[in-house]
Image (cartoon, grey):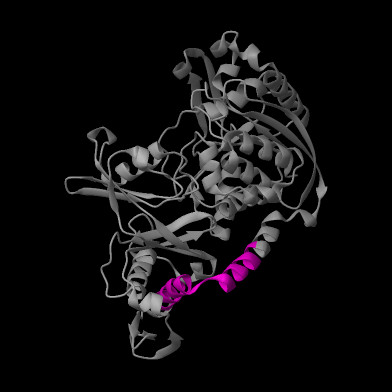
Amino acid sequence: MAIVGAFMVPHPPLIVHEIGQGEENKIAMSVASYETVAKKIAELAPETIVITSPHATLYADYFHISPGAEAFGNFSRFNAPNVRFHVSYDEQLVASMCEKAAELGIAAGTKGERDKSLDHGTMVPLYFINKYCTDYKVVRVGLSGQSYKNHYMLGECIKLAAENMGKRVVFVASGDLSHVLKADGPYGFRKEGPQYDERIMEVMGEADFGKLFSFSPDFCESAAECGHRSFVIMAGALDCTAVHAQKLSHEGTFGVGYGFCMYDVLSCDERRNFLEQYEALERSELDARKKREDEYVRLARATIEMYVTTGKMLRVQNGKVVCSDSSVTGWKLSDELLNNRAGAFVSLKKEGLLRGCIGTIGATCSSLAEEIIANAISAATRDPRFPPVTERELPLLVYSVDVLGAAEKIASKDELDVKRFGIIVTKGTRRGLLLPNLESVNTVEEQIDIACRKAGIDPDENPDLERFEVVRHY
């Protein structure tokens, strides 16, 4: 046996009667959907329920799988301490999952547990499931800041482990949808909120899991969702598996999206190898993008590829790009790169996630070409948020180069525009910069707040503001 059924569910605490005290009646469709899901799980009689939760222990570069033999939890945080849970963990399945993850090079395991108690992303589904069945073990899996590809591969590890152990396993992907559906909701409104909910319900309702990779991380962040990566892990657990999908309901009564889908497992279907299909498409798009790169981006790419593979630096000599050992590359630079001086930022992305970004506010080198060379090496090797880029990563990198115009002081935020202007905030010796037209930054207030946080400035300190324009090269 392996995965015998899978379910996409939300985890609003107020759907629990002892917490909602009648408020759950306002999301009656969600209550009914949870009852349907719980009854179906009972029919499947799983030996183990794997639950992925955004509220379990989370690390940026590691998937945490809860260790030990058992765990406890209650809803005291939500004023319902008498609603208690005790689960037995499936230690054998956990060990097999960790073994499979190691084989695939996925950073996952049972180390680094910060809180042994069950989280509400786990307990809300169990509250309904336990009404109809209790004879099962649990595997609790946290999400991470890793790529969608790695989340999908973790799902594949779960599938392989279940097959290896010969167990009946049900997969529960716990996760709310957008949190910004309504202006009067707890998190306000952004247009990306309803856009995300509509798209994700279509994708999940049709079990078209390959499209999960098309949701950019920046878009998901703007939509303030919490379940997307949980759904991606579930998709991986259903890799090469034919399913019958049933969309049960979607509600956004309180400004947060609650979506339910369930999947009956039918048979093996090698055509549903969504990760392999995505990787093939990704390679094709990266090749096409590389062919379209202008000389600014080609210079950044060449600099990083040379430095990472050989340790040698490119430099400018007699209008050409040469290597540090004086071997000419045969690449003549344009007058624009040779004769202009300006600040520049080099940004790297990998699988939709930022992989490095370093730049200069003003010119520090004798030419723009040298500015790009210096900042490209720094972006790849000296960004304190990331380890140095490795040779293996080079084919996966997407580059952009922002050339900064002169900064000008402004009197107030009313002179800003997040799409057109970047911002510099200054208070004493502290200074922070944020580039314009970033997908995850929608308002001037967000732009100022992020720039201040980068500089260690409290926005209430009323920092000096400057704005600048950029020319962005892809």
Reply above or below: 39 against 353.
above
The overriding secondary structure of the stretch rendered in magenta is helix
Q: Nearer the viewer, residue 431 or 167?
A: 431
Reply above or below: 93 against 75.
below
Q: Is residue 200 magenta?
A: no
In this rendering, does residue 92 appear at all?
Answer: no
Residue 448, horizontal then vertical, whole percent? 35, 41
Residue 255, horizontal then vertical, whole percent? 57, 24
In this rendering, does residue 436 appear at all?
Answer: yes
Residue farthest to the top?
Answer: 22
Residue farthest to the left?
Answer: 428
Q: State which quadrant residue 88 falls in.
A: top right
Residue 234, horizontal then vertical, whole percent? 65, 43
- At 58% across and 34% down in the image, what residue appears? 193
Residue farthest to the bottom?
Answer: 327
Is residue 259 rendered to the left or right of residue 311? right
Which contiguous range is marked in magenta? 282-308
Q: Nearer the viewer, residue 378 or 10?
A: 378
